Amino acid sequence: MDQPQYSHVQKAPLYLILYGVALVCALAACVFSDKAGMGISICGGLILSALASSFHHLAVTDLGDRLAVRFGPTPMFGMTVRYSEIVKVEVGRTLILDGWGIHMSIRGGWVWNLWGRDCVVVQLKKGTLRIGTDDAANLEVFLQGKAGGCKNF
């Protein structure tokens, strides 16, 4: 495969928050004297640890005919968008209520965000995708070129 024309990795401390809460769960397990409370705390801590290992960074990479958006380094969450599906692109900002992670926005469409509020709003033939990034201007220019020069909103 050729070298990607666009590749950017945003790093953020979100995983530290998740590991911190997992540690609190582990400590809580030590406090509980009943097996049910201990089990719930241990399971919660393990789940949060697995999630934390998936949210060290957000990589956005050109794959030739599509864009890959992947959290990592543990590859639990990822998706691709075909450039032929993109209608419009613009730099935007997520709402404070949108927060971080992968979820539906209260404005409609999906949010994939690791940290901060800067994003690129990608209007697709079927829906909207907000990709959180600390490289919004460069991603917007790249996507406009790959999507046939689509114009801003």
Image (cartoon, grey):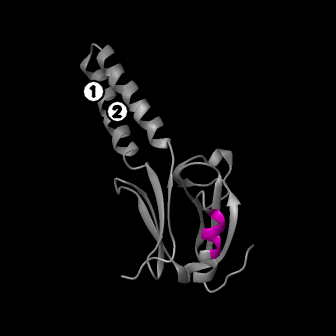
Tell me the residue at 50%/42% (across/down): 13
Upstream in the sequence, badge 2 or badge 1?
1
Q: Which residue is mark 2?
A: 45
Whole-angstrom CA distance, mark 2 to mark 1, is 10 Å
Q: Tag 1: Cα neighbours inside 10 Å, few (<14), some, or many (≥20)?
A: few
| Residue under label 1 | 39
| Residue beneath the point at 39% across and 50% down | 54
What residue range appears in magenta? 136-141
Residue 39 horizontal/vertical position (percent): 27, 27
Q: Residue furthest left?
A: 35
Q: Residue furthest right?
A: 153
Amino acid marked by disc 1: Gly
Quarter of the figure that contains the C terminus? bottom right
Q: Which quadrant is the N terminus positioned in?
A: bottom left
**In the image, what residue occupies the spot 66% across and 66% down?**
137
Left or right: 20 with respect to 135? left
Mark 2 against mark 1, which lies toward the viewer?
2
Dominant secondary-structure state across the stretch colored magenta: helix
User: Is residue 77 a member of the stretch shown in magenta?
Assistant: no
Percent across and percent down for residue 35 are 24, 20
